[in-house]
Amino acid sequence: MVKVFIPSDTTACALGADEVAAEIALHSEQRGLQVEIVRNGSRGAFWLEPLVEIDSHLGRIAFGPVGVNDVFDLFESGFPEPCEHPTYMGKVADIGWLKYQSRLTFARAGMTDPLSLDDYRQHDGYSGLMRALTMSPADIVEEITASGLRGRGGAAFPTGIKWRTVLDTAAEQKYVAANADEGDSGTFADRLLMEADPYQLIEGMTICAMAVGATEGFIYLRSEYPRALHALKQAISNAADANLLGNDIGGSGRHFDIQVRVGAGAYICGEETSMLESLEGKRGLVRFKPPLPAIEGLFGQPTVVNNVLTLAGVSTVLAKGADYYRDYGTGRSRGTLTVQLAGNVRYGGLVELPFGVSLRDLVEEFGGGTATGRPVHAIQVGGPLGAYLPESQWDTPMDYEAFAAAGAMLGHGGVVVFDDSVDMAQQAQFAMEFCALESCGKCTPCRIGSVRGVELIDKIRQNDNRQGNLDLLDELCETMESGSLCAMGGLTPMPVRSALKHFNQAFEAGQGNEKHD
């Protein structure tokens, strides 16, 4: 029997994977062929989706992108064996876009049935937890600290320090909260991991619980991710049935449960304290800090709040060792960076590489330039609050410190590409509009400043008291940066300032999208 792998993640299905799977099943039955269809996770090469793979004597062979109308010709050409066809890609391992990545966190993505615990274990899954169960909590924390793992949600705070704080804070109840409210434009890595490899998140959360003494965990999931919700719920149930969650995990005498909570549909709930408020059943408003969530978090108890990719990285660190993980990357940015290529880009998808690769290499070598074929004009990194980078900055190494020195941020790794038809003044105005729409409203600089920012940029674009309003906009940005309670208001000026600095001609009346750097 031949195994045929067809992804079941959101992107592949949006591109027709379900219909392709049904058509392949139909043709196999009509031709009397013994075929087992496995709905695997996507490898993140979205430009090739639906990507159909087969197990053959040559190894995993790929065809893509495969549409419903391709299926008949595929079978006529000799499918499900390796065969000549316009969609034939050869060995998956030889596809350059995948071959030249360094996948640690996404090593299993696309390889397995996401809900098969046997598949997960056969590909080194749960080896990290088994090791953690033989270690003391302090030793687990030390391993994470030594690895150099930092928060992948955007703040890049050292994970080991956060865990140490929770471990050292005395309390009868502690929590682990996975922030899966992935709301940045151009980002999808959390979703892809939860849909393609959900046990990795569950394992990472369980290791964290063993390290800090937590007994309850919550996954705060973005409401727009129904397929991830299904995958997580099923995976949690399977893990509990296998004694990998619940009471006496792996015979260790330790206890940990995980629940999934669907988010409130607000961008601000991606901020950790707003997320905790929402988890408690309240409106998602930013909390004053201190106290930090690590000391007084969920329901006033010590809480580890980590991003999905951070917790997923934990399983790799414990399975392979701190030294193995730390050997990837550069400077203080250790391990791998998960980049999500989106926007006007030819080869969109997920790329995982060691920190230090240049933005130019990512967009040109992996992204293939723009989808329109026009010159790349600007690249926004780090979500809707990230800076717009001109060509002069594309050789900046992608690590936290180098980007901070350039007045930018890596954030969650979203990279959105724009060609030379973009109106950069409009993009700057969008940043203020986005803040006005998504602000929780608790602090004045964010709530009022963003509205005033939209008005000021509109006046500047119309050449209404241009210099006076530019000066006022600069003062407004400074107020938002210094006076906002959280990064929502504090970072909104970043895309505005970068657009004014590097593409200022676009703000002149009648200039539209003229390029300037």
Image (tube, helix red, strand yellow):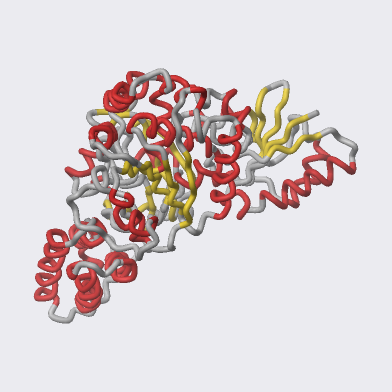
Q: Is residue 82 left or right of residue 478?
A: right
Please tell me whether residue 197 is drawn above or below residue 498 in the rendered image. Answer: above
Q: Quadrant of residue 367?
A: top left
Q: Position of residue 248 (x, y in %)?
A: 50, 28
Residue 154 vs residue 142, the one in the foreground: 142
Name which residue lies at 23% across and 31% down. 332
Q: Position of residue 214 (x, y in %)?
A: 37, 37
Q: Is residue 52 left or right of residue 474?
A: right
Please say whether residue 359 is visible from this viewpoint.
no
Quadrant showing the C terminus = bottom left
Residue 514 vs residue 287, the one in the foreground: 287
Residue 419 vs residue 129, the one in the foreground: 129
Furthest-front residue in view?
Answer: 172
Please tell me whether residue 322 is drawn above or below residue 447 in the rendered image. Answer: above
Count of picture labels: 0
Q: Position of residue 380 (x, y in %)?
A: 32, 53
Q: Quadrant of residue 453?
A: bottom left
Please say whether residue 489 is visible from this viewpoint.
yes
Quadrant showing the N terminus = top right
Q: Is residue 350 left or right of residue 2?
A: left
Q: Position of residue 39 (x, y in %)?
A: 67, 41
Please tell me whether residue 274 is drawn above or below residue 363 in the rendered image. Answer: below
Q: Quadrant of residue 185?
A: bottom left
Please tell me whether residue 112 is drawn above or below residue 376 in the rendered image. Answer: above
Name which residue lies at 47% across and 21% down. 130
Name which residue lies at 23% across and 79% down. 462
